[in-house]
């Protein structure tokens, strides 16, 4: 029998270290009491049932979905077509897009929040729209990389040229040939962007706060009142992120299979 080496042992310790807090949170979300014992004294669905009957949570969840989904939709409406044009017809300008992508990482959330407040608070623009615009810019790196990689994986320029040689117009080649070939990569970029925005807390809390309560702000409030309900919120969030991760993994695997064929 092959002995396990130190790398495998360290990896196992790391996995246990990462999983234990998640398991503890999940157990606490379904426990009746857990004060003086190693394991919970009982199991209940009370906290989870309360969570899904609480209109404040459902409204916060809906706001998070609306805000994150709206930002992703706007990004795909305005940014993705621009990336298509640059990558396909003006590749020499890609360096400017890459510079903009790098700049997105240059602004920490706190500094960005202060800047947005000072720039837009006195203009009469609802700050939630300001947050929406900041979210669209914030996911630029993921949208850009996902779109660019998808176009390069299918040799988009050659694919369009071949479709046009066979009699398709530019619009037909784009809509009926190129988009079906790259949509899995675009979908992965959309899901990744949505998952990142759904968990964002610093910007929305500092700029808008409880005036537009999202899931993360709801969770922060519940941490001060009920650990069980806060743990239930974390479990719901982890389940949602796990589902999105599974979908992203499946699509990525499918894209790799298509690329190899």
Image: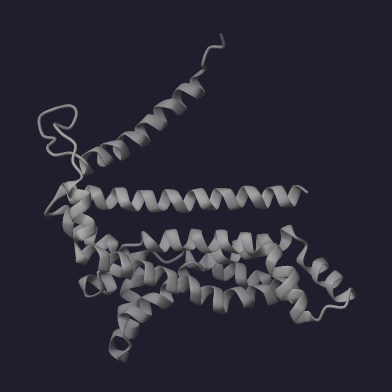
Q: Is residue 92 visible?
A: no
How far across and how far down the image is residue 97, in percent? 61, 71
Figure coloring:
one colour
Residue 196 occupies which quadrant of the picture? bottom left
Residue at the image position 30 percent from the left and 79 percent from the top: 117
Q: Nearer the viewer, residue 191 or 41?
A: 41
Image location (x, y in percent) of residue 225: 11, 54
Q: Is residue 218 left or right of residue 107?
A: left
Is 29 left or right of 161, judged from the image as shown? left
- Locate the N terminus by quadrant: top right
Position of residue 162 relative to residue 192, above or below, is: below
Residue located 43% across and 74% down the image: 70
Q: x and y percent of residue 85 in the render?
A: 69, 77
Q: Is residue 259 left or right of residue 236?
A: right
Q: Position of residue 113 (x, y in %)?
A: 33, 72
Question: Is residue 261 shown left or right of residue 21?
Answer: right
Residue at point 34%, 76% (across, down)? 115
Q: In this picture, is 168 found above or below 253?
A: below
Residue at horizontal 39 percent and vertical 53 percent from the top: 240
Please say whether residue 96 is visible from this viewpoint: yes
Residue pushed farthest top?
Answer: 1
């Amino acid at each position: 029998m092959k002995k396990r080496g130190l790398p495998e042992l360290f990896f196992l310790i790391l996995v246990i270290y990462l999983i234990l807090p998640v398991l503890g949170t999940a157990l606490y979300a379904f426990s009746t009491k857990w004060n003086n014992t190693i394991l919970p004294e009982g199991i209940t669905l009370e906290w989870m049932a309360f969570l899904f009957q609480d209109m404040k949570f459902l409204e916060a969840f809906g706001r998070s979905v609306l805000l994150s989904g709206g930002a992703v939709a706007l990004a795909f409406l305005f940014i993705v077509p621009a990336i298509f044009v640059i990558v396909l017809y003006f590749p020499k300008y890609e360096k400017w897009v890459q510079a903009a992508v790098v700049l997105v990482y240059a602004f920490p959330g706190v500094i960005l929040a202060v800047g947005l407040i000072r720039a837009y608070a006195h203009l009469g623009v609802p700050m939630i729209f300001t947050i929406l615009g900041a979210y669209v810019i914030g996911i630029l790196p993921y949208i850009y990389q996902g779109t660019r990689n998808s176009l390069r994986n299918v040799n988009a320029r050659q694919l369009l040229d071949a479709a046009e040689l066979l009699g398709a117009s530019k619009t037909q080649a784009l809509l009926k040939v190129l988009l079906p070939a790259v949509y899995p990569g675009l979908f992965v970029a959309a899901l990744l962007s949505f998952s990142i925005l759904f968990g964002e807390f610093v910007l929305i809390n500092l700029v808008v706060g409880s005036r537009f309560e999202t899931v993360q702000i709801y969770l922060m409030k519940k941490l001060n009142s009920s650990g069980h309900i806060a743990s239930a919120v974390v479990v719901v969030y982890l389940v949602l992120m796990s589902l999105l991760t599974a979908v992203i993994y499946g699509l990525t695997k499918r894209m790799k299979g298509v690329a190899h064929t």
